[in-house]
Image (spheres, rainbow, N blue to C red):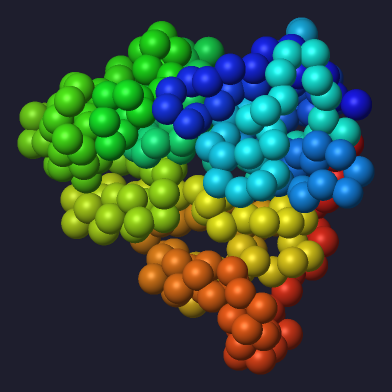
Amino acid sequence: MYKIVEAGILAGNIWRMVVEAPRVAKRCLPGQFVIVKQEEHSERIPLTICDYDREKGTITIVFQPVGASTWKFARMKEGDAFMDFTGPLGVPSDLCTDPIEEVRRKKILFVAGGVGTAPVYPQAKWLHEHGIECDVIIGAKTKDLVILENEMREVANTYVTTDDGSYGRSGMVTKCIEDLVQEGHVYDHCVAIGPMIMMKFCALTTKKLGIPTVVSMNPIMVDGTGMCGACRLLVGGEVKFACVDGPEFDGHLVDFDAAMKRASLYKTQEGMAFLEAQEGDTHHGGCGQCGGE
């Protein structure tokens, strides 16, 4: 069992939990995720790692209840425990695995949309711990939905923008990207994490500006081990699976329109049958990187 040592609301309907999982905390890197299951027959939920403390043996997760399982998660409290907390899964961020001197030469921009701020934070924190500066744009619909602002300001140059202009800059994250470039900021690497539609338009914006961009396709993951095929997507015309090949990919090569259409079809039995007939042998992935707890 994996004990919850902290639980509470970050903002609106966005929850934060700190969970005792020492083996995950010992091995994880920014960009990876965990599979969380409340009870023996509960649904398996993939959640990106928001933070970790190797000494305390804890992992921080952030989630927004969107279904029955995450709704039940939100009703758990300090002292309760998850039955399964499996990880780390997925491929770590390139920024944490590439030669450090190569990373130091990059001028890095992170674009975090909504709950996507959670997986951006450990990457920015990792860079800060290694003496590397970066800029972070936090985007939210309104002031009340901005999360992790104080934590982010401690590790990065942070710009907040809200769609309605109720806090920080006014407008969507794509406008903020363009504004920062016009103000003289120079970037040669961007990481965008958030809703699919946000990442699509971030990638379109950075492509226009000539900024190589990485996106995280964790929003489309279901099983998390490559077995269900839900996170199948096309990257540069090649079939990939977000959970075992990613979750991070070249944002200028991801076919977002196909991924969003596929995600909507995958919600129904009829849609899944259609996709299986259409995609043949590439419909399902294979269990490639399940090693963890």
Q: Is residue 98 visible?
A: no
Q: Horizontal placement of 248 versus 138: left or right?
A: right
Q: Where on the picture, by quarter, is residue 165?
A: top left
Residue at image location 30% in from the left, 40% down from the top: 188
Q: Is residue 273 above or below residue 109?
A: below
Q: Horizontal placement of 163 versus 258: left or right?
A: left
Q: Is residue 35 visible?
A: yes
Residue at image location 68% in from the left, 13% down from the top: 6
Residue at image location 48% in from the left, 20% down from the top: 10
Residue at image location 80% in from the left, 40% down from the top: 37
Quadrant in the picture for the N terminus: top right
Q: Residue furthest left?
A: 182
Q: Horizontal placement of 154 versus 207: left or right?
A: right
Residue 282 in percent (x, y) is at: 68, 80
Quadrant in the picture for the C terminus: top right
Residue 77 in percent (x, y) is at: 71, 18
